[in-house]
Image (tube, helix red, strand yellow):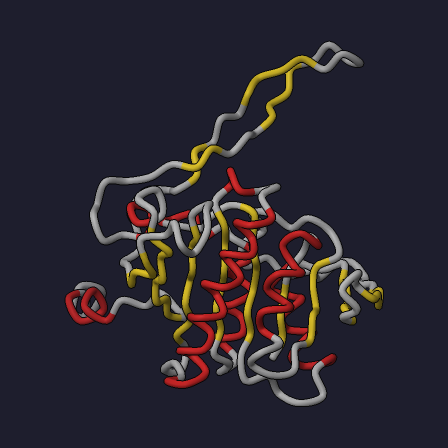
Amino acid sequence: MVLRMMAQLMLHPLADALKTLGEVQIVAPAENQSAKGTALTTADPIHRTDVTLPNGMAAIGLTATPATTTRIAVTKISVVRPDLLVSGINNGVNTGLAAYISGTVAAAREAASMGIPAIASSLAFKAAKDVPSFQAAAEATLRIARVVKTRGLPNGIFLNVSVPAGTMQAFKGIRLTTQGHSLGLQDTYEERVSPRTGKPYYWNRLVEGADDIEGSDSWAVPNGYVAVTPYKVGEFDKATFDALQNAFK
């Protein structure tokens, strides 16, 4: 089982929780990779750093995007092919269309494209420094991972998990959801002036948003549910393909 995470606050609870399922190997981007989506590291050397975490677990840091980190973890680092990949816990939920720019989701998608069951786990922004919330997110992710380990997932399918701030006792439950239609994250692009050059620049502060479609992931999280959304690898649309069969002859 390969576990991909970044910050230690996000890493410890989930790493400790997943140890109950089997051997855990931690491979993580060494630097912040927010909103990198499915980008790959191609033009730069990828450096590896082996460390021991405060909880005694070994971890490997790579100077690579999340998707590239998954590729290297599976093909170059893991001696045994992983039976599950868990990506997270990300700081900020990846609901709705925000999943397309998420490095956390991309890491899980990359594993699914390689035939490995995968889960992407993210926690609401406002819980960024809330240790109990990360522990609750780890517990919720563990419950979902147990289901995946027991039931499996169809080939090319992975789960996108988004967790609200709070405790397991405070959550209304774990809910299977659809993907919302909103971006999930709102760009602000604050205009500022550089004190050094006097020239204007833009600073993007992402704000979590939501839509009002009950049953979607971006509805579920603000309403106190842990959202579990099944995703598939690839975006080919068979219905449109069939409809346009004769359009380009």
Residue 211 in percent (x, y) is at 28, 40
Q: Is residue 69 above or below residue 186?
A: below
For the point 57% across and 17% down, the residue is 191
65 left or right, relative to 205: right
For the point 43% across and 39% down, the residue is 185
Q: Is residue 186 above or below residue 195?
A: below
Residue 125 in percent (x, y) is at 51, 41
Residue 209 in percent (x, y) is at 38, 36
Residue sitting farthest toward the bottom: 80
Residue sitting nearer the eye, 57 or 73: 57
For the point 54% across and 85% down, the residue is 83
242 left or right, relative to 225: left
Residue 164 in percent (x, y) is at 42, 48
Q: Quadrant of the C terminus?
A: bottom left
Q: Quadrant of the N terminus?
A: bottom right
Residue sitting nearer the eye, 16 or 193: 16
